[in-house]
Amino acid sequence: MRKINISLNENYEDLSMAVANRIAAIIQSNPAALLCLAAGDTPLGALRALVDIQAAGHVNLRNVWYVGLDEWLGLGYQDKGSCAQIMQDSFYGPAGIPLDHVSVFNGLDPDTAIQTTQALAFITAHGGITLALLGIGMNGHLGFNEPGTSIDFPGGVVNLAETTRTVGTKYFDKPFPLERGITVGLRNLLAARHLILMANGEKKAAIVAACMTTQPDSALPASWLPVHPGFELYLDRAAASGLPDQLIKHA
Ligand code: PGA
């Protein structure tokens, strides 16, 4: 079994702090870093902790660059639960990130080709992604790179998997048609220098174990991560509970 760089944490708070400290260290050694940040429930604690680390004077989040990982097509900032709303209100706003340092997909723009081109051009202009902070979907997706996505997919519009559409309702207090999404693709994510996958809770244990112990397989997009030299896996005890002992021993 491939050795994985694992950070095993007692609970969500410790996990969030560990991820935030790691991101702060990466920013400190990469002053022109481009961060690609996921907007699900999982990273929120780390993003809030990063804002606190900045407030304490230990990192400057305002000089680096940000590209949003994904967005639901048809949703924008005014829709509570959209990626744009979550990230602006819990991170970009509180951290005081200058607007021109952020590229996020506008899910309301019917011209999805322009949205895709802009995000991919932003990534290219910054020399690629320095760090992608990712969560894992219940089906092993990364961003909206759903099962079956090619590792050559640069990014763009995708049809959402059934699991993603069902699980996705948790972000919203009213029903939205969650059919398509727009995402940074596996090709750009896997070209990042650092890849941090963060997972917490018992419900993620089985999919984490499946993706971390199989050979890379397009049916499980997160299974491509362990072969990446800059991959780091951050878990709480519950999310790690399905991993075999040989892997945990490295933690
Ligand atoms: P979550 O989403 O962080 O809200 O669990 C993860 C994902 O779907 O990638």
Image: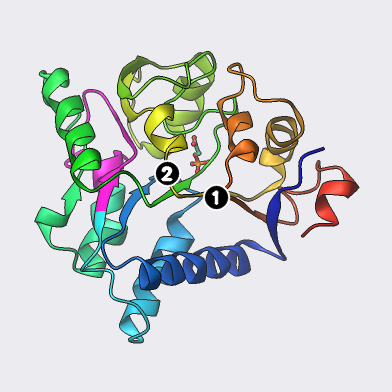
Give how far across and how far down residue 205 sits, in percent: 73, 40
Give how far across and how far down residue 120 sits, in percent: 23, 33
Give how far across and how far down residue 188 sits, in percent: 37, 34
> Tag 1, which secondary structure?
loop
The three-letter amino acid code for the residue at tag 1 is Gly
The question of residue 105 being in magenta is answered with: no
Camera-side residue of 28 and 14? 28
Q: Which residue does the numbered mark 2 point to in the structure image?
A: 192
Quadrant where the image shows the N terminus: top right
Query: Is residue 80 something that shows in the picture?
Result: no
Give how far across and how far down residue 54 sits, in percent: 33, 78
The three-letter amino acid code for the residue at tag 2 is Ala
Q: Is residue 31 above or below residue 232?
A: below
Instruction: Tell me, yes or no, whether the two marked residues, 1 and 2, touch with CB atoms within 8 Å.
Output: yes
Residue at 28 percent across and 69 percent down: it is 61
Residue at 17 percent across and 35 percent down: it is 121
> Tag 2, which secondary structure?
loop
Residue projecting furthest to the right: 245
The question of residue 72 being in magenta is answered with: yes
Camera-side residue of 73 and 142? 142
Left or right, 250 with reference to 118: right
Quadrant where the image shows the C terminus: bottom right
Q: Which residue does the numbered mark 1 point to in the structure image?
A: 230
Start-end of magenta stretch: 66-85
Image colouring: rainbow
Image quadrant of residue 174?
top left
